[in-house]
Image (tube, grey):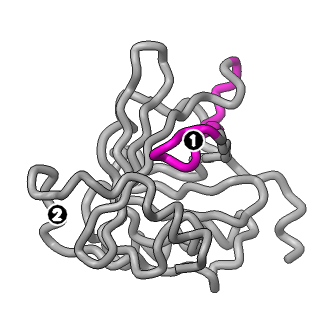
Amino acid sequence: MGGNKKEMQVVKGLDLNRYIGRWYEIASFPSRFQPRDGQNTRATYRLNDDGTVHVLNETFSGGKRSYIEGTAYKADPKSDEAKFKVKFYLPPFLPIIPVVGNYWVLYIDEEYQYALIGEPTRKYLWILCRTPRMQEDIYEMLVQKAVDEGYDVSKLHKTPQTDPPPEDEHIPKDRAGFWWIKSIFGK
């Protein structure tokens, strides 16, 4: 696409204290790091004492929770742009291989209720919301912003979310790393 040549517009002055917390994945480009039948996918961010962000990504497949944890940090600590690096260790149950990805906040509303996340290669895209449901007009506005940034939104896949979402205290905690293993085999 011709739009891929221009530099993406990234949020400036992101307030990390307002950004942390839980976000639900409303839609994304499918990733080999997540199960194809994943639902109730969400990310929870917590500020660490050193200024980095603890990342907990969760998804549910076959009624079981899969998750991976990592750390996010500013790509350039001197910049006011919301360009982050996220580091995960693979496989999660035997963390030996660091995998670092880009996490760019392309749009966030004034109330910090919904966001558009991308990265410079345009291979990954996420639409996030503080609740498991998003109004259709807001969704369409975020999709248009992605188009404006040069994304091929035909690859966008809506993530099934139940309402209410799974509660933390009722979730089995024994699935660390299994989505990574399954991704190797294309499951």
Task: Tell me how far mark 2 sits from mark 1, CA to CA.
Answer: 26 Å
Residue holding disc 2: 166
Residue 89: mark: 1
- Span of residues in magenta: 78-96
Query: In what element is the residue under mark 2?
Result: loop
The magenta stretch spans residue 122? no
> Above or below — where is 34 with respect to 54?
below
SS class of the residue under badge 1? strand
Looking at the rendered structure, the number of numbered marks drawn on it comes to 2
Please state which of the two labelled residues, at mark 2 or mark 1, is closer to the viewer.
1
Say which amino acid is labelled 2.
Answer: Pro
Amino acid bearing label 1 = Tyr
User: Looking at the rendering, which quadrant does residue 100 occupy?
Assistant: top right
Q: Which residue is drawn at 82% across and 52% down?
A: 7
Rendering coords of residue 29 (x, y %): 58, 73
Q: Decide: is 148 above or below 87.
A: below
Q: Nearer the viewer, residue 29 or 13?
A: 29
Residue 164 as seen in the image, left or right of residue 40: left
As drawn, is 140 to the left or to the right of 22?
right
Residue 115, disc: none
Q: Which of 68 and 15 is in front in this view?
A: 68
